[in-house]
Amino acid sequence: MSKVCQLTGKRPITGNNVSHSNRKTKRRFLPNLQKKRFYIPETDEWVTLKVSTKALRNINKLGIYAYLKKLQQKGIDTGIEL
């Protein structure tokens, strides 16, 4: 299962673990993804999305339908038909 947000496109990035002696080893920073089920009253359907917590905050602020419309206007493909 990929670790990519379906709405914002956030994905893992790489960096270094830095020890006290300043040794560096590679590591991955994973996005905080949550699998969440949303009800869209305008289309009368449930959708399950894997979203980052940043996307969840935007959904809480704008509403799921308005947020998906905003992404659609920007040209971002979410995989959801509105």
Image: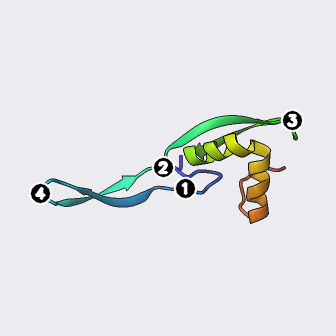
Q: Measure the C-alpha gap from mark 3 to mark 4.
A: 57 Å
User: Earlier along the polypeptide chain: callout 1 or callout 2?
Assistant: 1
Name the residue: 75% across, 42% down: 63
Q: Which residue is mark 3?
A: 44
Q: Measure the C-alpha gap from mark 1 to mark 2.
A: 7 Å
- Outermost residue toward the left in this view: 21
Give how far across and how far down residue 45 sits, in percent. 82, 36
Q: Are marks 1 and 2 in contact (CB under 8 Å)?
A: yes
Other-residue count near label 1 (Cα within 10 Å), few / some / many at <14 / 14–19 / ≥20: some
User: Earlier along the polypeptide chain: callout 4 or callout 2?
Assistant: 4
The kind of residue tagged 2 is Pro
Q: Are marks 4 and 2 in contact (CB under 8 Å)?
A: no
Q: Which residue is mark 2?
A: 31
Q: Measure the C-alpha gap from mark 2 to mark 3.
A: 30 Å
Which type of secondary structure does the marked residue at label 3 adopt? loop
Which type of secondary structure does the marked residue at label 4 adopt? loop
The kind of residue tagged 3 is Asp
Which type of secondary structure does the marked residue at label 2 adopt? loop
Residue 79's disc is: none
Q: Which residue is mark 1?
A: 10
Q: Are marks 3 and 4 in contact (CB under 8 Å)?
A: no
User: Earlier along the polypeptide chain: callout 2 or callout 3?
Assistant: 2
Q: Which residue is mark 4?
A: 21
User: Earlier along the polypeptide chain: callout 3 or callout 4?
Assistant: 4
